[in-house]
Image (spheres, rainbow, N blue to C red):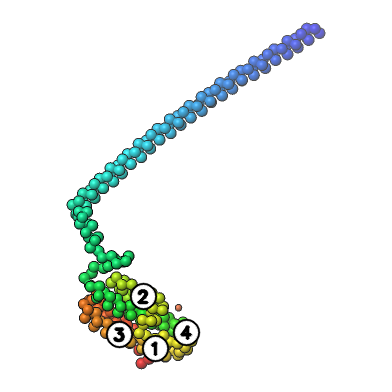
Amino acid sequence: MYKKIALSISLLIIGTLFFYSQNNNNATDDGIHKEGFQEKVVESVEKSDSLSAAYKDVQDTNVNEETDSTMDKDESELESATEESRIGESSEEVDKKIDDIQIVGDTMEPKIGLDKKVRDESGKLLNTILADEYLLYTKTYNYHWNVKGLMFNDLHLFFEKQYEQLEDFVDSVAERVRSLGIPALGTMAEFIKHSRLKEDAAGTVLSEKEMLANLLSDHEAIIRSLREDIDKTDEIGDMGTNNFVTDLMEKHEKMAWMLRSYLS
Ligand SMILES: [Fe+2]
């Protein structure tokens, strides 16, 4: 009996010692693994840091090289431009050129071989044409909206085509005025005041035939006025405006023919 108890106690002690021994070995292995892992982590981080540093160095070198190259290029272009400027005109010559440009208010006067008086006369003549064109443009638009009758669809589209042409005329005449260095008219009040044509009275109701006849009459009136303007621009020697007005007159002649064709 005592032998059995002694044997059991001995086995228990041996088992306990073996258990602790195993745990201690595991703990030591874990420690080794943890240490190994930490070393690897530290090594990777160091490698990563050194790679980043190396990459940054390369980048810095490239940027510096690019900047140096750009700066070298800019400096050489600047030197070359300065050299060209020296070869071309002296600063005194440039100053003189600026002095020669006549400044009136904030407007730079065109030096296009036409006296101020000629440009003023052409500008006035063109502004009157501009007023005529704008009034006829508005009248044609009005008829496009208000036409009615058996020919509604045909005339609605026909008037649309005509007011689009007149809109182009308005723009090109105004830009011709500006090309001569003269201010272009730009308000309804000015257009009505300077136009040689007349508006319909407000609320006037017209038949299709009356609309066509009114527009034809206005186009023919403009053509007659333009013919006089052609002679005048010839007299004052503004051949650019003379050519412009001649071209404009021919376009009105064609538009008038189309209107007349409805009425014939
Ligand atoms: Fe329309």
Label 4 and label 3: CA atoms lie apart by 28 Å
Evaluate if marks 2 and 3 touch, with contact meaning CB atoms under 8 Å apart.
no
Q: Residues within 10 Å of mark 3 (few under 14, many from 20)?
A: some
Evaluate if marks 4 and 3 touch, with contact meaning CB atoms under 8 Å apart.
no
Q: Which residue is mark 3?
A: 225
Kind of residue indicated by mark 2: Leu
Across and down, in percent, residue 155 comes to: 42, 85
Q: Residue at x 22, y 52 (%)?
A: 85
Q: Residues within 10 Å of mark 2 (few under 14, many from 20)?
A: some
Q: Nearer the viewer, mark 2 or mark 3?
A: 2
Q: State left or right for residue 166 relative to residue 90.
A: right
Q: Which residue is mark 4?
A: 146
Label 2 and label 4: CA atoms lie apart by 28 Å
Q: Nearer the viewer, mark 4 or mark 3?
A: 3
Evaluate if marks 4 and 1 touch, with contact meaning CB atoms under 8 Å apart.
no
Kind of residue indicated by mark 3: Ser
Q: Which residue is mark 1?
A: 214
The kind of secondary structure element at disc 3 is helix
The answer, for residue 231, to whether it is visible in the render is yes
Label 3 and label 1: CA atoms lie apart by 17 Å
Question: Which residue lies most toward the left here?
Answer: 87
Give the image quarter of residue 5. top right
Could you say which is closer to the camera, residue 147 or residue 99?
Answer: 99
**Residue 53 circle label:** none
Q: Which residue is mark 2?
A: 185
The kind of secondary structure element at disc 2 is loop
